[in-house]
Amino acid sequence: MPSLPLDDENLPLFTVGQVSAMLEIQQAFLRRLDEFRVVRPSRSAGGQRRYTRNEITVVQYVVELAGEGMTLAAIRRVLELESRVKDL
């Protein structure tokens, strides 16, 4: 049986509005994450941000870190370092 698009965790399917509703956060916060290069979703042909399931998981983690008082610059650095450790 062929897999469905929803099975692909890296397929950019979700809009800013959908993600903000799912995670109960402001759409402006998601845009700031993109501006600060913390979570960089892909763009649709019309220029709208589209999030993957993996990116939504990262946004959840970012919300937790921000709730603990970390700045977006610090969170970006944490994500970069965790990615490097994972690669090693």
Image (cartoon, rainbow, N blue to C red):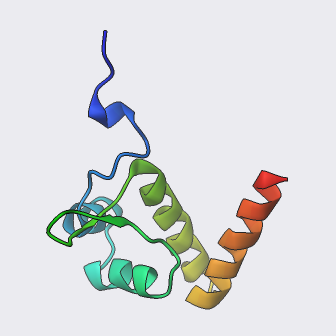
Describe residue 71's horizontal placement relative to residue 7 as left or right. Answer: right
Whether residue 71 is visible to the viewer of this picture, yes or no, is no
- Find the residue positioned furthest to the front: 45
State the image coordinates of residue 18 (x, y, percent, origin top left). Answer: 22, 61
State the image coordinates of residue 16 (x, y, percent, origin top left). Answer: 25, 69
Describe residue 66's horizontal placement relative to residue 35 as left or right. Answer: right
Whether residue 49 is visible to the viewer of this picture, yes or no, is yes
Q: Which sits in the foreground, 78 or 42? A: 42
State the image coordinates of residue 68 (x, y, percent, origin top left). Answer: 62, 81
Task: Say which quadrant the N terminus sits in.
Answer: top left
Q: Is residue 9 above or below residue 23?
A: above
Q: Is residue 18 above or below residue 80?
A: above
- Find the residue positioned furthest to the left: 46
Q: Is residue 20 above or below residue 56?
A: below
Q: Quadrant of residue 32?
A: bottom left
Residue, x 51% and y 81% (percent of image)? 37
Q: Is residue 1 above or below residue 49?
A: above
State the image coordinates of residue 27 (x, y, percent, origin top left). Answer: 27, 78
Residue, x 14% and y 69% (percent of image)? 46
Residue, x 33% and y 74% (percent of image)? 25
Q: Quadrant of residue 76?
A: bottom right
